[in-house]
């Protein structure tokens, strides 16, 4: 017998990038997007509202020898475009972190800085698995850049002196992770990623080590998050507000990351508001128009529905009081009251967390 009401599918894991200011979060995201696009094929990445989707095929193209795509059945990685621990800590989902996995960027010369410590505390508190990107390896004196190469290849091309200077910095970071209570090692030495944090030396500037980072993220997700990624793609959509924005012609809209189910145009949704949950009906679901078309046409295109994991702009009446970080829930075949109660409960949990900080 076929059960049409339930269709479990593996969704894309949601990835957030954190770290101290100037350690290279924005550059790393730009490089990941840029080198994915230069993989060439159409559909190498999909720009969402507030997020970028990199499909497994593209990751596999970038990672070359590091990845055997047949080892994976997760569809890829969805990177949240706004880096930083502030956005990370406000973005919750059912009491946990919205991001399924995180990249902690640490400047290999600077090591741990105040915001690195803060990010570590948040990752610990939310129990979010993470990898450390030891960034800016190209600034090691005498570095011989190997653009876009896997990091171990690049290391083979370095002088003994450069290699040992880099090693010294990397072990400093591994020591700081250990002081923070995390056992860590260079990622290729890690046997059990549940017990040890992998450190990936890389450069956002030259792209070396970026294939390794994507490989480790894919591997971690596949091995430890597969169960959480199994969702009912036809279920009522659930998401988190990234940002509330006024858009000409639409009024207040909410940029939302959908992490479960499907949101359809016309759905009744409950959105967390400043005073009380907002019950409203979706007038439009908007996505960025492909770059090539933007110049001549409107910035957004309307879609009929959007399934997890994805970023989408929701236009609906009465969204002025919506809050960043608040839950978005599709009502579908439940009662409005029940969903309102769910949203209230989730908001209360967020307030307790915020008061604790
Ligand atoms: P964020 O504040 O963490 O987002 O840091 P940014 O991405 O804005 O980077 C801060 C500065 O470091 C910028 O001037 C970048 O060009 C530079 N930068 C970032 N990554 C690298 C890298 O891998 N190598 C070098 N040499 N510079 C980098």
Image (cartoon, helix red, strand yellow):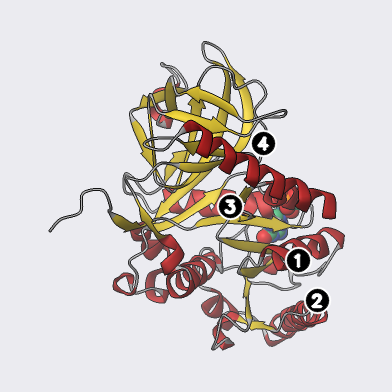
Residue at (48, 43) in percent of width and height: 238
- Residue 184 image label: none
The residue where tag 4 is placed is: 324
Q: Going from the N terminus, do you reach mark 1 or mark 3 first?
A: 3
Q: How far is mark 2 from mark 3, CA to CA?
A: 27 Å
Q: Going from the N terminus, do you reach mark 4 or mark 1 first?
A: 1
Q: How far is mark 2 from mark 1, CA to CA?
A: 8 Å
Residue at (58, 45) in percent of width and height: 81
Residue at (77, 78) in percent of width and height: 169
The residue where tag 3 is placed is: 94
Is the CB atom of the residue marked by disc 2 within 8 angstroms of ligand 1's nearest atom?
no
Tag count in the figure? 4
User: Mark 2 or mark 4, which is nearer to you?
Assistant: 4
Q: Where in the figure is residue 152, as x and y percent of width and height? A: 54, 80
User: Mark 2 or mark 3, which is nearer to you?
Assistant: 3
For the residue labelled by badge 4, is the local secondary structure a helix, a strand or a loop?
A: loop
Q: Of 198 and 96, which appears nearest the observer? A: 96
Residue at (67, 42) in percent of width and height: 347
The residue where tag 1 is placed is: 120
User: Mark 4 or mark 3, which is nearer to you?
Assistant: 3
Residue at the top extreme of this rendering: 249
Q: Where in the figure is residue 179, as x and y percent of width and height? A: 83, 80
Q: Is residue 246 above or below residue 215?
A: above
Q: In this view, does 26 lie to the left or right of 215?
A: right
For the residue labelled by badge 1, is the local secondary structure a helix, a strand or a loop?
A: helix
């Amino acid at each position: 017998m076929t059960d049409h009401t339930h269709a479990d599918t593996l969704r894309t894991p949601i990835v957030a990038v954190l770290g101290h200011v100037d350690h290279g979060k924005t550059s790393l995201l730009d490089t990941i997007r840029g080198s994915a696009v230069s993989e060439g094929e159409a559909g190498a990445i999909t720009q969402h509202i507030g997020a970028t989707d990199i499909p497994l095929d593209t990751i596999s193209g970038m990672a070359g020898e590091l990845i055997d795509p047949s080892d994976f059945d997760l569809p890829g990685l969805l990177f949240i475009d706004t880096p930083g621990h502030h956005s990370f800590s406000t973005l919750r989902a059912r009491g946990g972190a919205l991001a399924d996995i995180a990249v902690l960027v640490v400047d290999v010369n600077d090591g741990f800085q105040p915001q690195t410590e803060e990010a570590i505390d948040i990752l610990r508190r939310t129990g979010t698995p993470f990898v450390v990107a030891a960034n800016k390896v190209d600034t090691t004196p005498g570095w011989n850049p190997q653009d876009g190469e896997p990091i171990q290849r690049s290391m083979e091309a370095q002088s003994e002196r450069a290699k040992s200077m880099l090693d010294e910095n990397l072990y400093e970071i591994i020591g700081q992770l250990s002081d923070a209570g995390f056992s860590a090692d260079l990622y290729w030495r890690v046997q059990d990623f549940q017990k040890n944090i992998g450190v990936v030396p890389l450069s956002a500037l030259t792209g070396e080590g970026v294939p390794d980072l994507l490989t480790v993220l894919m591997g971690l997700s596949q091995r430890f998050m597969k169960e959480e990624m199994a969702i009912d793609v036809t279920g009522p959509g659930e998401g988190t507000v990234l940002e509330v924005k006024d858009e000409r012609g639409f009024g207040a809209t909410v940029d939302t990351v959908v992490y479960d189910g499907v949101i359809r145009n016309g759905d009744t949704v409950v959105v967390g508001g400043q005073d009380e949950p907002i019950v409203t009906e979706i007038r439009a679901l908007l996505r960025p128009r492909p770059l090539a078309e933007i110049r001549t046409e409107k910035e957004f295109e309307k879609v009929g529905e959007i399934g997890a994991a994805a970023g989408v702009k929701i236009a609906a009446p009465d969204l002025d009081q919506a809050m960043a970080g608040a839950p978005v829930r599709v009502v579908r075949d439940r009662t409005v009251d029940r969903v309102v109660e769910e949203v209230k409960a989730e908001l209360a949990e967020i307030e307790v967390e915020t008061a604790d900080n």
